[in-house]
Amino acid sequence: MNRPHITFSGRAAMIALFIISIAPLSAQRASVHATVQPTEIMIGEQALINLKVITPKDKAIQFPVYEKEIIPGIEVITMLTPDTTIENNVMTLNFKYVITSFDSTLYHVPHMSVFDGTDTLFSNSFGLKVTSPQLSDSTLAYLEKINKGETDSIDFNQLQLNDIKSVRKAPFVWTDYLWLLWIVLGIMLIIAVIGVVIYLVLMKKKKGYFFKPPVILPAHVRAVRELDKLKEEKIWLQGREKEFYSRLTDILRRYIHEREGFNAMEMTSGEILNEIRKVSDVDSVYDNLKQILSTSDLVKFARYKPYPDENDLSMVNAYFFVNQTREPDPVIAEKDKDENDNNQTLEKSVVKRD
C-alpha cells in the first residue's frame, strides 16, 4: 500500500534536484534591458539609449558598435564609455548611445544584442517617436500656393524661415582664466628667486658673506656696560653687599673667560689669580683683581661686612682691571688716517664758513 507513495516521493525528489541543479545555470545567465530617454523628440534633437546588462562579474560583455545607424532613420552620434558597478559578485554595466533622427515618424527598434563570451543576448524592443515642428496656418497656406505654382518667388518671411543665428560669444567667467594667474604668479616667483640668488652671490663676492653678521661688541665694552649698570643701582648702599659682590665677580669672570680663554666661571679665586699672573706682568692688574676676589670671598663665605670705602674701591678696581687688560684698539692705516684728517679739516672749514 505504501509503494506508490514511495514512488511519488522519489519522483518529487528528482524534480526538486533538477530544479536546484539548473537554478545556478539560470542565475549565471546575463540579462539585457534597453531604454530610451526621451521617448519623443523633434527632428534634429537628441535622445539617449541606455543598454543595461546585469551579469556575473567574471563575464566579458561585448556591446554592439554602430558605425552610423541602429536602424534606418535612427543615427548614432556617439557612444559613451560604459558605467560599471560590482556588488555581491554581480556586475551591472550601462552603455549609452547618443542618437538623433531627421525623419518624422514612429520608429520601432526590435532589439539590441550583446555577446557575453558564449551566447548572444537580445534586449527588449522599444520605440522612438520623431515629430516635425508645427507650422502656422499662414505658412501652410503659402506652401500650398508654392505647390500649385501660384507664386514664382519664395518669400521666406511668409514661410517664417530665418537665417541661422551667428555663433554667440560665451560670457566672460574669470575662473576660466585662473590658470593664467597661476602662470603669472609662478613666473614672478621664479624671477624673485633668481633676483635673490644674484643679490646673495654679489654680496658674497663683494663682502665675503651672504647676510650681514650681527655686531658683537668687544668683551671689555660689554664688561664696562655691565659695570656701569651695577654702579647706577648702588645696591651695596642698601645692605645687599653679598648680591653686589656676586654680580661684580660674575662680570669679571665672564670678561676673563671671553678675553683670556680659560673658564673662569668654574675656577676658584686662587686659580684665577694664578692664570692672570701668567698672562699679565703688570702688578697692578694682579693686585686690583686680588682685592676684589678676596673681599668677595669674605663677604660671601665669612659673612664679612665691608666698609663703604671698600665697596667703592672694589668698584674702581674692577674698572681698572678691565681697562688694563682690554684688547688694543685696531691700528688705523696711514692712508685711512690721512683721509680721516682731511675729512676733519674739511668739516672744520665748513663750520667756520657757516
Image (tube, rainbow, N blue to C red):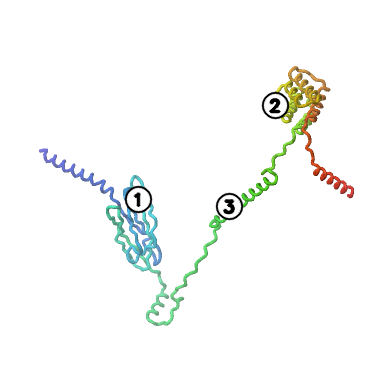
Dot placed on the residue nearer the N-terminal end, 1 or 3: 1
Q: Are marks 2 and 1 in contact (CB under 8 Å)?
A: no
Q: In the displayed structure, does residue 126 sit left or right of residue 319?
A: left
* Mark 2 surroundings within 10 Å by alpha-carbon count, few (fewer than 14), some (14 through 19), many (20 or more): few
**Residue 203: x percent and y percent?**
68, 46
Of the residues shown, which amino acid type is indicated by label 2?
Asn
Q: What residue occupies the far left of the structure in this picture?
A: 1
Closest to the observer: 154 or 274? 274
Amino acid type, label 3 = Gly
Residue count near mark 1 (Cα–Cα under 10 Å), binned few <14, some 14–19, many ≥20: some
Q: Is residue 115 above or below residue 153?
A: above
Residue 169 in view (yes/no): yes
Instruction: Name the amino acid, label 1.
Output: Thr
**Side (left or right) of 1 relative to 115:** left
**In the rendered view, does 272 fall on the left or right side of 63?**
right
Residue 267: give x, y in percent of width and height.
70, 23
Which residue is under mark 3? 186
Inspect this view and state whether residue 37 appears: no
In the image, residue 144 sits, relative to residue 230, either above or below, namely below
What number is the disc on residue 263?
Answer: 2
CA separation in Å, label 2 and label 1: 83 Å
Q: Residue furthest top?
A: 302
Give me the disc on residue 92: 1
